[in-house]
Amino acid sequence: MPNKPKNFLKVVLILAERLKGLRYAIRGTAGLVLQGLEMNVDDIDVLADKETALACNDLLSEYLIEEVAFKESEKFKSYFGKFEIEGVPVEIMGEWQIKDNKGIWSQPFNPSERIRLDKGDKDDIYVTAIEDELKMFALMGRWIAYQKIKKQI
């Protein structure tokens, strides 16, 4: 049975409230679980545009672990920061790009291309589409997770 952090939904609702009206989407395994797929969730990844990512330094300041700032590694570049909300790690990725095995950077993943989930609460929750997640998992070379998603759709 897949696992998720104890306060998962509470953290998702806090994020929806704090980021209301901004360009963001919950992505990765957390976003897939919110869409009904069975995945293991260790943290919550939030895809954002640059402005939203940088705004998280203030909007989520009491949860700050690592300030959102531009970072680039061999495989990824993004406005990246870490937070911990209710004991759940939350990573913000603004204008996130992935380098493929040919050394070509992807276009920044767009948080405007998202799905709104109506959970009946005061704030809507936005997630990335499953098709977009498949593209991201393929670019990252996460083939086991990719296959797990494919089997469920």
Image (cartoon, rainbow, N blue to C red):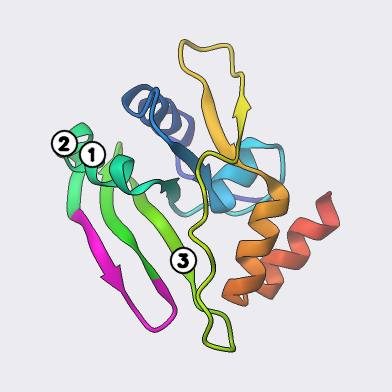
Q: Which residues are magenta?
A: 67-76
Task: Mark 3 or mark 2: name the one nearer the start of the chain.
Answer: 2
Residue 23 at x, y percent in the picture: 43, 36
- Looking at the picture, does residue 73 appear above or below residue 47? below
Q: Is residue 140 above or below residue 3?
A: below
Looking at the picture, tell me which residue is in the foreground, 88 or 127.
Answer: 127
Residue type, label 3:
Gln
Total tally of numbered discs in the picture: 3
The kind of secondary structure element at disc 2 is: helix
- Sort mark 2 into few (<14), some (14-19) or many (20+) by Cα contacts within 10 Å: few
Between marks 1 and 2, how big is the CA–CA gap? 6 Å
- The amino acid type found where label 1 is placed reads Ala
Q: Residue 24 in magenta?
A: no
Q: Could you tell whether 95 is left or right of 151 in the image?
A: left
| Residue indicated by mark 1 | 55
Q: Residue at x 57, y 73 (%)?
A: 140
Q: Which residue is mark 2?
A: 58
Marks 3 and 2, Cα distance to the nearest angstrom?
Answer: 24 Å
- The earlier-in-sequence mark between 1 and 3 is 1
Residue designated by label 3: 97
Mark 3 in CB contact with mark 2 (< 8 angstroms): no
At 43% from the left edge and 60% from the top edge, which residue is drawn? Answer: 96
- CA gap between label 1 and label 3 equals 19 Å
Left or right of 20? Residue 79 is left
Does the segment drawn in magenta span residue 72?
Answer: yes
Q: Is residue 131 visible?
A: yes
- Amino acid type assigned to the residue bearing label 2 in the image: Asp
* Left or right for 143, reference 107: right
Secondary-structure class at tag 3? strand
Quarter of the rendering containing residue 75: bottom left
Q: Residue at the bottom extreme?
A: 102
